[in-house]
Image: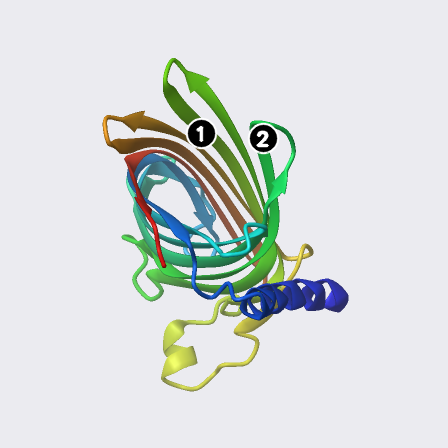
Amino acid sequence: MKKIIGYVWMCLVSFPLYAQFNNEENPRGMNEGTLAGFGTSIVKDTYLSPFTYTGWGARIFNERMTLLRNPLFSRQQIISVDISSTRNPAENVSDFGAFVDYTFAYHRRIPAGTNLRLMPGAFAHLMGGFIYNTRNGNNPLSAKADIDLGLSAIALYTFNIRTSSIILRYQVEFPLGGIFFSPPYKSSYYEIFNEGNTSNIIALNSFHNKAALRNYLTIDIPVHRSTLRLGYLNCLYYSNTNYLETRILSNTFMLGWVKQFVLK
């Protein structure tokens, strides 16, 4: 596992170094999309409750894709903010969740045909947030914080409808390893932050105790002088450490606009 994490880290470091060596620090173009969406959310956090909660989720999603001077490489930055409201099976207790995550990635562009481009790459990901339970008195909140390194892949397909060029994109991301915050079983946040009981609150993660997956599907449609983006985002998060289990599944349908910039 250490070899895999080391390889991903080298990829993340070597991409910007390669770009700088080839005078790519001054990008030549940027594509920025801002979307808002609504969908479903499923949450289970055994620190708060043994039950699975279901409900709705909302998300704001900003993405910047920068084409570097060397057309083989592009840089991607994603900031996502999502909130959710879910209820237990008996419909008498609620969970409220709020998360912010940031992804920084480099991809290598590989032409695979006249209309198809493949873009494998690597990313670094930071996430923070919480889940709040309305019934719990002593421990009503479960905090989350992750730092991950992983792999990413994008497929872009362009086709024409009459005089309009439509761009269909699919992207998948999954982490290989990192660290995350997880309090020990039956340990309260009062003990952690007021009494200094911080042993075993940071865990190394890999496939044995954590899994995450993000599937992102978009279609860009020109509308007059603007570009409309329709998107679907599927996010899966699972962790199991310190005898605590967390499962978060969200499906979000999004709508927004895309802006194109020419940078010199």
Amino acid carrying label 1: it is Ile
Asked if residue 219 shows in the view, the reply is: yes
Residue that sits furthest to the left in the current view: 224
> Relative to 155, is 263 above or below?
below
- Which residue lies under the disc numbered 2? 116
Tell me the crowding category of disc 2: few under 14, some 14 to 19, or many 20 or more residues within 10 angstroms, Cα based. Answer: some
Of the pair 133 and 10, the residue shown nearer to us: 10
- Which residue lies under the disc numbered 1? 167
Q: The N terminus appears in which quarter of the rendering?
A: bottom right
Q: Helix, strand or loop at disc 1?
A: strand
Q: In the image, which disc is placed on residue 93?
A: none
Which quadrant of the figure has residue 89?
Answer: top left
Query: x, y percentage for residue 171?
Result: 53, 40
| 41 on left or right of 225 | right
Which quadrant of the figure has residue 119?
Answer: top right
Q: Which residue is drawn at 29% across and 62% down?
A: 137
Amino acid carrying label 2: it is Leu
Q: Which residue is drawn at 30% across and 32% down?
A: 227
Q: Give the total number of marks visible in the rendering.
A: 2
Q: The C terminus appears in which quarter of the rendering?
A: bottom left
